[in-house]
Amino acid sequence: MKISMAVSTPDAEFSALALKGDYPDIFDLLQRCGYDGAELAVRDPDAVEPDELETLLKQYELTLPAIGTGRAFGEDGLSFSSPDEKIRRAAVERILKHIDFARRFDSLIIIGLIVGRSERTEVNEARAAACLAECARYAAQQNVRLAVEPINRYETNFIITVDDCLSFLDRAGEESCGLLFDTFHANIEEASITDSIRAAGDRIVHVHVADSNRHYPGAGHTDFRAIIDTLRDIGYDGYLSAEILPLPDPETAVENNAAFLKAILDTG
Ligand code: LER
Ligand code: MN
């Protein structure tokens, strides 16, 4: 398993991003702390210059394992489950642009908050599944994978648990879609974090880590040794990407996360 950190530009509103700033400064710190990758929360891929980004990633020897798309919901109000057809269309178009962007970097596209906060009804779930299916078909053509993320009940209204997500993936019926397992959400919603990892099994394509309080792993009461052992057991060999609060300060969070995870990954 490799480690990465979810980061963004200074304008991002989402709080669980330890580093918000200019990419050279962020990438420099990640490289110094031994990270393999930088996960970017991108509002609109049109605002990112891909040649520049590619050069920087090479310079700091980092990969771009995944691109977070929740800012399109949080800041632009785009949603797969909106009753407004125009909003759903704009959400799909935004994700199609993300897919084009991701192809060049071999990144996953995260489908989390973009599903929206609509009420859990059959019609809303059908709307969201249709949007996902359209994006997933395009992703398959472009050889890009989508990672659908269960998000806790205080932030969304459906696709809350691993079970919800697996049913939703079956409904969209596309092989290009897998599951993003986030330890913070699982700590709130799952009866057992490790059982839910086993239930998802090889459908897991990406993992977000944060402790029970969304601070860096090691700063709360989540059992990361058990989580990492279970991920190893199911054959997961992707990234542990930290989506954490910048506490007590961004540098300490980034350094302590790397040191804590590496100590577990390097043993047993
Ligand atoms: C996004 O990855 C996530 O985990 C959500 O909590 C965003 O609000
Ligand atoms: Mn997450």
Image (cartoon, grey):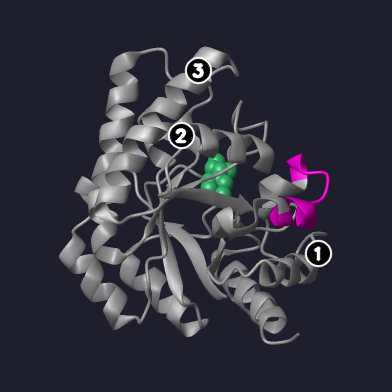
Is 1 displayed left or right of 131 in the figure? right
x and y, in percent, of residue 167 in the image:
60, 35
**Tag 2 or tag 3, which sits nearer the N-term?**
3
Secondary structure under tag 2 reads helix
Give the mark, 3 or 1, whose residue is nearer the N terminus: 3
Residue 148: x %, y % from top left: 50, 44
The residue drawn where x is 79% and y is 59% is 222
Q: Quadrant of the C terminus?
A: bottom right
| Amino acid type, label 3 | Asn
In front of the other: label 3 or label 2? 2
Which amino acid does the dot numbered 2 rest on?
Answer: Ala
Q: Is residue 58 above or below residue 104?
A: below
Disc 3 secondary structure class: helix
Q: Tell whether label 1 touches label 2 (CB within 8 Å).
A: no
User: x%, y% of residue 83?
Assistant: 41, 12
Residue 172 got which mark?
Answer: 2
Residue highlighted by disc 3: 124
Asked whether, in this view, residue 57 is left or right of residue 127, the answer is left
Is 18 drawn above or below residue 163 in the view shown? Answer: below
Q: Tell me residue 162's x, y (percent).
A: 66, 43
Pointer 2 local density, CA inside 10 Å: few below 14, some 14–19, many at least 20: many
Rounded to the nearest angstrom, the CA distance separating label 2 from label 1 is 33 Å
Alpha-carbon span between mark 3 and mark 1: 35 Å
**Quarter holding residue 224:** bottom right
Range shown magenta = 188-198
Of the residues tagged 3 and 1, which is closer to the observer? 3
Type of the residue with mark 1: Asp
Residue at mark 1: 223
